[in-house]
Amino acid sequence: MNIPQQVLDYLNQEVTGRIALIGCRAQDLVNPFPCCEYDIAYFDAGPRNVRVVRLDDKTIELINFYSNKSDPISLYRMIPISYRNMPFLPGPFVNNNLMAGGVFIGESNKMLVNALFNIETASRHFNLRIDLSSLYLKAASYDLIVGILLRTGVKPMPSHELSQIRNLIHPSDQIKDCIESALECLGLERASKTSIARSYRALREIIKNRDDKNIIFSKIDYL
């Protein structure tokens, strides 16, 4: 487990109890993006809400699972951390691949149903509010992409989803058509620097009060 010493030092000073590395840095990725944060899951009493900590060029996101351990996809392939006053997680927490396949299929079904509902809503608004209709159609396209990834056993990770969907191994012709339609609807293949910069400015205003806004901005800047 390749966690920088400065991150481990911070965790040792500020954290007690059981924790684990989750997110893209705990997945089977050869090279996570430098902008990817270190997602740390708490399993004992810790911060009530998500907390973001910046250490030089590293970012830590502390996420509380103490009161809610019902999110198996977020904990998929987590890596327990043991460092000085942080003991290894006990067996039931370490074995995080139990029922992973069934959970992925269940979440995939939810996303695909969401996509259908959004398409239906887009159709209802088409004649009166084309802008609103377009918004729902883009939401449906995103739900479809996430649903396809989950259906194929891939845990979607926001910064990597475009690469993940493009690099699916041997998708069927039907899945290929769905992916092409979704990407076309989202406009990713024809996005220009100008349109991205304009959207970025709008996004900054929309999420300016969120605690994790700096994580989102750093990923956009990097990508």
Image (tube, rainbow, N blue to C red):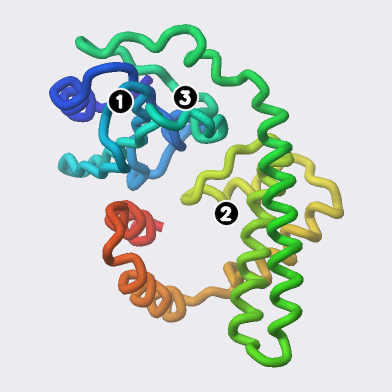
Callout 1 secondary element: loop
Report helix, strand or loop for mark 2: helix
Could you tell me which residue is drawn at 70 percent across and 76 percent down? 122
Quarter location, residue 176: bottom right
Q: Nearer the viewer, residue 200 or 222?
A: 200
Ranked by sequence position, the earlier of labels 1 and 3 is 1
Residue carrying label 1 = 3
Cα distance in 3D space between marks 1 and 3 = 13 Å
Task: Please report whichever mark, 1 or 2, sits nearer to the chain's N-terminal start.
Answer: 1
Instruction: Report crowding for label 1: few under 14, some 14 to 19, many 20 or more residues within 10 A (C-alpha).
Output: few
The residue under the point 47% across, 24% down is 78
Picture quadrant where residue 107 is located: top right
Nearest to viewer (mark 2 / mark 3): 3
Q: From what the image shows, is residue 185 above or below residue 149?
A: below
Three-letter code, disc 1: Ile
Residue that extends furthest to the left in the rendered view of this protein = 13
Q: Which residue is mark 2?
A: 162
Identity, as a three-letter code, of the amino acid under mark 3? Met
